[in-house]
Amino acid sequence: MATLTLSDGCSLFYERRGKGRPVLLVHGWMGSHRLWEPTFADLSEDHDVIALDLRGHGRSDRPLSPYTYDRYAEDLKEVIDLLDLDGVVLVGWSMGCGVSMLYHRRFGAHRLAALALVAGSPKLVRDRDAGWAYGMTPEMHHRILAEVGKSRPVYARLLTDGIFHARMPQAVKDLAFQTALEASLPCALESFVDGGRLDLREGLDQIRLPVTVFHGRTDFLASFAAGEYMARTIPGAELLAFDLSVHAPQWEEPERFHAGLRALMVRI
């Protein structure tokens, strides 16, 4: 466990285990490195596994602002460069999936070897005018934002209970709930607003890395159709569908999830 100080003075916490090809794990909205525990357990025997807490989350600093996907993508590049990582397998989950796609749009394949896009979407909110019929409605997006601002613990409990299948042990749901409360409120609000306005479809067809899209068929936050779109649009991408997962396949179907990551790395 360690910290890195970025160029703007913000300190980011990260956990690092194992040796081998670097695998950089990027958590989702109101998450932290702690939600990657199954991946540490599986991959760190033969890989250099690194999971950071994005600014405003977990044990990282909580500046007042900015909490945008652009800032997070810039932070990722700084982390990769400061740790001098090469041949990185970048694994982005949920919001981290969007951040990973934006990283590639802005910085290309800089120091990357492969992309794993987990339970994400290139556009979070439906937009008929933009030809995007997947994901949450604008009304749902506004309602979530209002509920988080009014009573984050209540919404965090609903969210973290809902992202897992019904058989998930309560202890895992409680862990996700605790990490949600660790995120700063300005971070939770600003990043959710920014995620709602982003459209990351442009540039997906320019990705020339091995890519696997990991997606639960019953995901209610990022629809399965969005995963199918990403796999269809990114050249050579493979889609790994999870019949028993909602939004967290690394917890819900860990053996199949980590076998999928290893299969992705064989394609490098």
Image: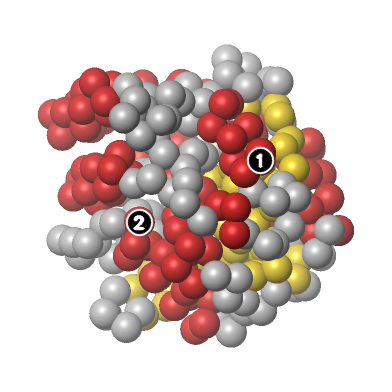
What is the secondary structure assignment of the residue under circle 1?
A: helix
Whether residue 94 sits left or right of residue 231 in the image: it is left
Residue that sits furthest to the top in the current view: 166
Sequence-wise first label, 2 or 1: 2
Q: Nearer the viewer, residue 136 or 49?
A: 136
The quarter holding residue 253 reads: top right
**One can see residue 18 in this view:** no
x, y percentage for residue 128? 34, 25
Q: Nearer the viewer, residue 55 or 209?
A: 209
x, y percentage for residue 158? 36, 21
Q: Up-down: is 80 above or below 229?
A: below
The quarter holding residue 47 reads: bottom right
Q: Which mark is residue 231?
A: 1
x, y percentage for residue 242? 70, 27
Callout 1 crowding tier (Cα within 10 Å): few <14, some 14–19, many ≥20: many
Q: CA distance from mark 2 to mark 1?
A: 21 Å
For the residue marked with disc 2, what is the amino acid? Tyr
* Tag 2 residue: 69
Whether residue 162 sits left or right of residue 87 in the image: it is left
- Image quadrant holding the C terminus, namely bottom right
